[in-house]
Image (tube, rainbow, N blue to C red):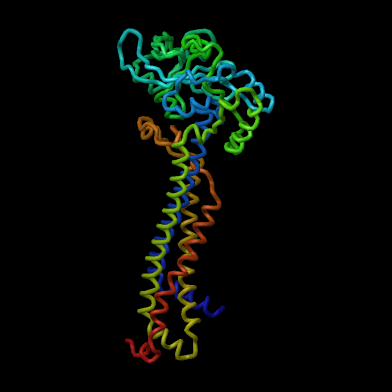
Amino acid sequence: MGFIITLAFKNLFRYRRRTIITAIAIATGVSMYIFIDGWLQGAQAESVRNLVKFETGSARVVNTTYWEQKDFLLPKYDIPDPAPAEAALEKAGYTVAPRVTIFAEASKTGGAGEAFTLQIAGIDPARDGKIFDFANALTPKGAVYLTAGRSEIMLGSNAADRLGVVLDDSVRLTTRTRDGVWTSLETRVVAILSTPDPIVNNIMGFVPLDVLQNALQMGNGVTDIVIGFPEWLDPDKETAAINALLAPLPGSSDYVAKSFNDLAPEFGQIAQSKSGGTKIILFLIFIIAAIGISNTVLMAVYERVREIGMMRALGMKNGAVMWCFIVEAFGIGLVGALFGVILGVFAELYMVNIGIDLTPMLENMGNIGYRILGVSKSLWNPDTIVTAAIVSIIFSGIMAILPARRALKKEITECLRVK
């Protein structure tokens, strides 16, 4: 076997140009796979953080009917008395914050600017900040956080631009009360939110919970009990535990807990697409390796027919000859994988530490699933690096079998007659 390995690697250097060209093709595929997978991993992790910190929280308890008709956000399907559920959740160690979430038509008071539908969340200023991170997204200078009891609003930056409002302008919200009666609420803009979540920036506004409850005639009722827990915990397992925790409470059959995966289903679809996309990239590496290695080995076979015949005439078995070509292909795959990993790691170093600013491309694209604006960075994924390298090496060797078998089908005398 030592002789076969030595001979195979000598052949690598005998045909350097061909080896280098094939190795470059493999290296390109491997490096692209490492780069894209790391970038998608980073975008997914950042999206989860932004989704939880700015949009949904880790989970929510809602009225079952409210959830079934979640496309309408109707306040009449509320949790009339959230106190027992909140107490049980806090006793279990969860952070909770009550909310009322509705749709309302927003317009700048005085009729100037565009009027359009916003998702309005009534939040408890004292408790909401324990789950969400809006306090670090307030703009411009002079902006302040909401104060309970005051008719104020914080608007997403793009929503504020569409309404044509700035700090201290007045915004009218028109919606239906809990009983279905039309009502209007005049609010003063106290902050414009510039968050890394484009959904918040585009379509959301926030007012004090008690002000919205009064306007909607809801009493102490809420539509959501937002729950916060560490992001490294499994959201689906935690949601199941929350549902079990709430089961003994009166009226619990009318409520259901949903994780952020349920609250933003399009994000889950993006995660699945990412997984499928990386598999496609890996498949493309197979194709690159297949074409490159097959072509290289086939050319080597045709150029060395007499050499193959001579080795067989001297007593070298067909299996040993085939292994010479397979090991040679392994060597090309090894060279390509090595350079591909080096290129991919250098690209990842840049993306992990510096990243690329996606704001100009994504800020006006609406809901594309990923919750990410600003600088997008990658995450290291050692499994991807190892998988890409091993697969390219193994597949390179496998693709040498068919061309080598073609040479071994010829008789020894026929091989020796070839000029």
Q: Is residue 410 left or right of residue 275?
A: left
- Foreground: 298 or 110? 110
* Image location of residue 259, percent across then percent down: 54, 33
Check the picture and name the quadrant holding the N terminus: bottom right
Residue at the image position 44 percent from the left and 74 percent from the top: 401
Task: Tell me if residue 3 comes above or below residue 286 in the rendering.
Answer: below
* Image location of residue 140, percent across then percent down: 44, 17
Residue 346 visible (yes or no): yes
- Foreground: 266 or 28? 266
Residue at the image position 49 percent from the left and 42 percent from the top: 378
Residue at the image position 35 percent from the left and 14 percent from the top: 107
Task: Tell me if residue 304 comes above or below residue 61 in the rendering.
Answer: below
Residue 138 visible (yes or no): no
Number of marks in the rendered image: 0
Check the picture and name the quadrant holding the C terminus: bottom left
* Image location of residue 75, percent across then percent down: 47, 18
The extreme right residue here reads 91
